[in-house]
Image (cartoon, coloured by chain):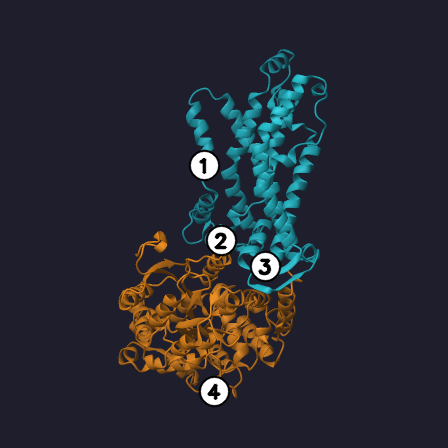
Chain colours: A orange, B cyan
């Protein structure tokens, strides 16, 4: 690790980059970029807690105190608006924005924007896919890869086979991911006019919201729900899907690599991996393309950084096509560049490369609002547990959300 | 900080009025106390005042432009919200249970520490060890002991995969256990200080008069150490009322195990909802003041007598 630059001695500035934990991928890129900068800067890596909520808490606390040691930070896609609105982030200049945007998919780029300005440069993306057991789908006579495959058909097929659909239904962000994807896929929005901040209008009570509530509630109350749905996060969902009762699963692309390494470790049979199929996120209405859940994280520059130009140079270097593609290969986090998916090494590691790219390209972000924490908290509070969701839930969520944002209720 | 609040506002002892010496002593006392008093006011009064000001606003740290003055509305919202009363009930339950159990256990330990002859040092040390352990560490110890996957408690009790933290009252039970284990030594230490002051001659006189051990406890020991009991109870109650670490580590506030401090933390730190969070903090402060007031009035004790003169 580089020594902190507070000594005041001459020499290149040391940039501090707060990263989300990974297997060393970001630190490696930091070193490569520092080496390539020709002595313009060195980089000190600080690792944030593993979960996005705690990352946000630590960053907010530091930035509220105008911490100048935050030069670059890895920021989950859902927090751009909140940080930018609070004045915590240094916006990218038009010239930087043009260079950073080049070749990147529009959907991830949008997660880094607030009020038409780029505040966070996409460094990795993610999109949930539909995973299914080929043999069971065949037995049920359905084709999940058909573009018009819907949630209703999926639930019917699982019930017919007496098998399970794995989802993330625990009281956490992953449940919000599911609900948001259903509402967006149905053509609705959890929050309308999100840029208005406090005056944004909750809009779950709509045709899309009602259908989303019907899907969540009826699935959770049916025998097609995994028994641990109310506490299931990504890994619990994967365990059910790989087990004897698994048939469908909505989950991120890492699950394929995880299943393969489970085979290598001897905890999973190769025949299960061979039986795994993948398709685009199912539709809510047959006549409307789905909006696959979009994840990932971006790189932002602290508003109080003493070296914003060098920090921008580091961001441009670390989010370059070559670095991001390599990161996808090393760390299994999907790239934000369309071109990455044509790389032969990526195509070899990811048989579903095209599907991942298209899902990200047409992915639906969670509401881009400075009140995201309140919005997500209100939705999760009113929609949990999944089996309690009924036709009144969307309207209840709207009312509660509006009260919380305007300070009439406690969250 | 709370000590000032417990100081009864009775007039100065009448004896001090006339004599010059007593007046000089009082002045010296004021001079000696002044520096620390000023520092205390500086470091506590400013944040307290700022919190009161913030509590009158609808203000998000991350939405500076949306800041607006709402008067006492935040208090109104909190006091009519089920979340506050739920957290209030949880905090109240934990406080009552832990303080009651700790008082009884603490008495037992204090007696043991007072009467033991052989191995006095090791026994006193052993009793005090839990208090030396950081609360967060103790919370993790108890959490792991009761966890479904790694815990031994379920195995010992043959409970299978009973999820202690999956239900409100079983989770509060574990939280109370951890709290009691950790802070009983504190209360027993304060009670020991009171026990030491009970005059031995009175005990013996009572014995000679044929009083039973039970009578001596109720008629002599307890009345003589009333002030010490009150200090111990007051300190522990205020501590228990502000409980945060155990629920934070064990349940994260899930299943209705959130306490008032936790609510303040969540509003201030997680949601950076500074207006509402400050209002919760001020309400928490007012409840603390109320508890202190009730204790001081209820026990009718002049704390200055704890000096033993």
Q: Dot 1 lies on which element?
A: helix
Figure check: A198 above or below B171: below
Which residue is the site of mark 1? B132
Which residue is the site of mark 3? B273
Quarter holding residue B207: top right
Figure check: A61 above or below A100: above
Residue occupying the point 58% across, 50% down? B259
Which residue is the site of mark 4? A148
Quarter holding residue B132: top left
Q: Nearer the viewer, residue B155 or B193?
A: B193
> What chain letter is assigned to the residue under label 2?
B
Q: Dot 3 lies on which element?
A: loop
**Reading the chain from its start, which is encountered first: label 1 or label 2?**
1
Whole-percent x and y of residue A342? 31, 83
- For the residues labelled 1 and 4, say whether their Cβ atoms are less than 8 Å apart: no
Q: Dot 2 lies on which element?
A: loop
Q: Residues within 10 Å of mark 3 (few under 14, many from 20)?
A: many
> What chain letter is assigned to the residue under label 1?
B
Same chain? Circles 1 and 2: yes
Mark 1 vs mark 2: give the one in front: 1
Whole-percent x and y of residue B280? 63, 52
Which residue is the site of mark 2? B162
- For the residues labelled 2 and 3, say whether their Cβ atoms are less than 8 Å apart: no
Mark 3 vs mark 4: give the one in front: 3
Mark 3 vs mark 1: give the one in front: 3
Whole-percent x and y of residue A411? 60, 61
Query: Mark 4 to mark 2: distance in Å?
Result: 44 Å
Mark 4 vs mark 2: give the one in front: 4
């Amino acid at each position: 690790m580089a020594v902190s630059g507070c000594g005041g001695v001459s020499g290149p500035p040391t940039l501090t980059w707060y990263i989300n934990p990974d297997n060393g991928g970001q630190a490696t890129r930091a070193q490569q970029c520092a080496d390539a900068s020709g002595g313009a800067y060195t980089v000190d890596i600080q690792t944030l807690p593993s979960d996005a909520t705690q990352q946000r808490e630590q960053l907010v606390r530091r930035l509220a105190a105008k911490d100048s040691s935050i030069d670059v930070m890895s920021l989950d896609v859902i927090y751009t608006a909140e940080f930018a609105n609070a004045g915590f982030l240094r916006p990218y200049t038009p010239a930087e924005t043009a260079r950073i945007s080049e070749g990147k998919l529009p959907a991830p780029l949008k997660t880094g924007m607030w009020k038409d300005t780029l505040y966070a440069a996409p460094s990795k993306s993610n999109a949930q896919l539909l995973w299914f057991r080929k043999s069971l789908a065949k037995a049920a006579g359905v084709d999940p890869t058909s573009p018009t495959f819907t949630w209703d058909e999926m639930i019917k097929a699982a019930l017919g086979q007496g098998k399970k659909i794995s989802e993330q239904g625990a009281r956490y962000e992953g449940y919000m991911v599911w609900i948001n994807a259903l509402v967006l896929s149905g053509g609705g929005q959890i929050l309308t006019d999100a840029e208005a901040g406090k005056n944004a209008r909750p809009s779950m009570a709509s045709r899309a919201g009602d259908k989303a509530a019907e899907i969540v509630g009826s699935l959770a109350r049916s025998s097609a729900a995994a028994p641990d749905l109310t506490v299931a996060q990504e890994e619990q969902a994967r365990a059910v899907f790989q087990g004897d009762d698994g048939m469908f699963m909505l989950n991120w692309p890492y699950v394929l690599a995880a299943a393969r390494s489970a085979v290598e470790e001897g905890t999973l049979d190769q025949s299960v991996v061979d039986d795994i199929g993948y398709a685009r996120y199912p539709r809510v209405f047959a006549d409307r393309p789905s909006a696959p859940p979009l994840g990932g994280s971006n790189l932002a520059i602290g508003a109080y950084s003493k070296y914003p130009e060098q920090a921008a140079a580091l961001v441009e270097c670390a989010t370059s096509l070559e670095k991001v593609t390599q990161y996808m290969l090393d760390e299994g986090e999907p790239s934000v560049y369309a071109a990455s998916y044509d790389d032969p090494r990526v195509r070899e590691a990811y048989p579903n490369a095209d599907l991942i790219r298209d899902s990200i390209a047409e992915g639906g972000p969670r509401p881009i609002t400075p009140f995201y924490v309140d919005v997500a908290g209100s939705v999760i509070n009113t929609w949990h547990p999944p089996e309690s969701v009924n036709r009144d839930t969307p309207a209840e969520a709207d009312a509660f959300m509006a009260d919380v944002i305007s300070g009439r209720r406690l969250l | 900080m709370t000590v000032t609040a417990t100081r009864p506002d009775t007039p100065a002892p009448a004896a001090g009025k006339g004599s010059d010496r007593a007046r000089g002593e009082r002045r010296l006392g004021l001079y000696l106390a002044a520096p620390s008093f000023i520092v205390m006011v500086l470091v506590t009064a400013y944040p307290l005042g700022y919190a009161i000001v913030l509590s009158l606003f609808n203000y998000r740290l991350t939405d500076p432009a949306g800041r607006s003055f709402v008067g006492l509305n935040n208090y109104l919202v909190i006091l009519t919200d089920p979340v506050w009363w739920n957290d209030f009930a949880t905090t109240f339950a934990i406080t009552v249970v832990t303080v009651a159990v700790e008082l009884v256990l603490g008495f037992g330990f204090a007696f043991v520490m007072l009467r033991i002859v052989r191995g006095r040092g090791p026994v006193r040390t052993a009793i005090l060890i839990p208090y030396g352990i950081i609360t967060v560490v103790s919370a993790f110890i108890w959490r792991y002991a009761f966890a479904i996957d790694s815990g031994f408690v379920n195995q010992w009790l043959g409970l299978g995969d009973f999820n202690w933290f999956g239900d409100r009252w079983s989770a509060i039970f574990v939280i109370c256990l951890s709290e009691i284990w950790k802070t009983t030594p504190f209360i027993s230490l304060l009670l020991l200080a009171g026990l030491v002051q009970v005059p031995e001659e009175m005990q013996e006189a009572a014995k000679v008069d044929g009083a039973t051990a039970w009578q001596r406890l109720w008629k002599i020991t307890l009345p003589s150490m009333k002030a010490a009991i009150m200090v111990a109870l007051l300190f522990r109650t205020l501590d228990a009322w502000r409980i945060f670490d155990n629920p934070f580590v064990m349940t994260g506030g899930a299943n209705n195990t959130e306490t008032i401090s936790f609510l303040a933390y969540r509003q201030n730190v997680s949601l950076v909802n500074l207006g509402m969070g400050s209002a919760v903090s001020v309400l928490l402060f007012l409840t603390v003041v109320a508890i202190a007031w009730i204790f001081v009035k209820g026990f009718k004790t002049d704390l200055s007598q704890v000096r033993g003169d």
